[in-house]
Image: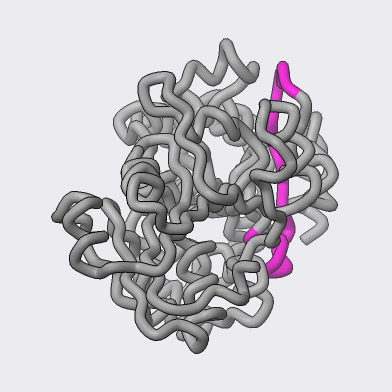
Amino acid sequence: MIQNLKGKGLFVFSDPGGAKAILALVLSIKKNLTDFLIVSDRSYDFFKEFGLLVVPAENTPLAIIESFKPDFVLAGTSYTSKIELTYIIEANNQNIPCFSFVDHWTSFKQRFLINDDLIVPSKILLIDTLAKKLAIEEGFSESQIEVIGNPYYEYLKTWKPLHNKIVFFENAFGNNFTGQKLLTYVPEPLSNVGGIEKYGFDEISVFEYLIDSLKSLANDEKLKIRLVIKPHPNQNKSTLLQAIDKAVIEEPLISINFIENLNINDLMFYSDIVVGMFSNSLIEAHFLQKKVIRLMPNSKINDPLTSILPVSLIETKMEICQIILDL
């Protein structure tokens, strides 16, 4: 159905996962549209990759819909913003077909709640049959759901960086990292939602676990490791920076960089290993053909990516070291 959308399309997103998927979708269907408008309350460095104009959400959904007069509205879903739902509400009020894309396998119902009111679009767009099964378990009916895959994963299959490795590292870090193994950590801000109590771990405990794992390799003069932390846009930076500062003092032989303003695709493409928990970035790294390490120490949950990523959870610090030594 989505590939057959025509007319004027209004696209709305906030969180990065939905943003990437919707921008990739617009690229794939824009030839069928007479016009389109993309609106967001956030700005990301990856916007320029797509060559599409993203307009800041400065007016109300009602004002934008009345001005643009879309034939349909397609929105992402977010944890930290309700902007998408406000557009779905207005589209429903005006009987405009509306769609919401969910870019993950978790918290389906939570994504559609405003003050305990469930906001349901014409269709909820999901990435695979597992997501459909989980959404139905949370109370959505099969008739409300359509599985469309993730347009961004298709986009990544042909994606290439603009610069070669030497130019990228010189621009990003001021040197070419000759002989260094680059590990990129892509944390999710689980501490924002009580991750330790809810999941058994959060981005801080996983970072500390990773640093502790790297200790035994720090004295190896032949093995130069640099760990880059690329924070999630919703990350409480002060909390993570405190953990990083502590690690730098206690483990001075481990090179650590905290980097916000760097294209994550470039960073992952040139990394030797991408480390995380269950972030979409791990799946994206997989499509970029990168080695992925997943850390979820003391986990209290069923792993949502077990059947998605062909990567086992790393259960011991020795395993982490061996993967690095085998590069």
Q: Is residue 56 part of the magenta span, yes or no?
A: no
Q: Quadrant of the C terminus?
A: bottom right
Question: Which quadrant of the figure has residue 197?
Answer: top right
Looking at the picture, tell me which residue is in the foreground, 56 or 255.
Answer: 56
Instruction: Please state the total of marks drawn on the protein image.
Output: 0
Q: Residue furthest front?
A: 95
Which residue is located at x 22 percent, y 52 percent? 62
Q: Is residue 254 visible?
A: no
Looking at the picture, tell me which residue is in the foreground, 153 or 322.
Answer: 153
Question: Which quadrant of the figure has residue 205?
Answer: top right
Which residue is located at x 84 percent, y 45 percent? 307
Horizontal side of 130 relative to 31 (left or right) equals right
Q: Quadrant of the N terminus?
A: bottom right
x, y (%) of residue 66?
A: 21, 61
Looking at the picture, tell me which residue is in the foreground, 235 or 248.
Answer: 235
x, y (%) of residue 265?
A: 52, 67
Q: Is residue 291 part of the magenta span, yes or no?
A: yes
Is 294 rendered above or below residue 7? above
Magenta range is: 284-301
x, y (%) of residue 43?
A: 29, 59
Is 140 rendered above or below residue 287? above
Horizontal side of 28 relative to 163 (left or right) equals right
Q: Is residue 267 visible?
A: yes
Q: Residue furthest bottom?
A: 31
Which residue is located at x 67 percent, y 40 percent? 105
x, y (%) of residue 52?
A: 36, 78
Horizontal side of 313 relative to 77 (left or right) equals right
Looking at the picture, tell me which residue is in the foreground, 170 or 11.
Answer: 11
Q: Residue furthest top?
A: 197
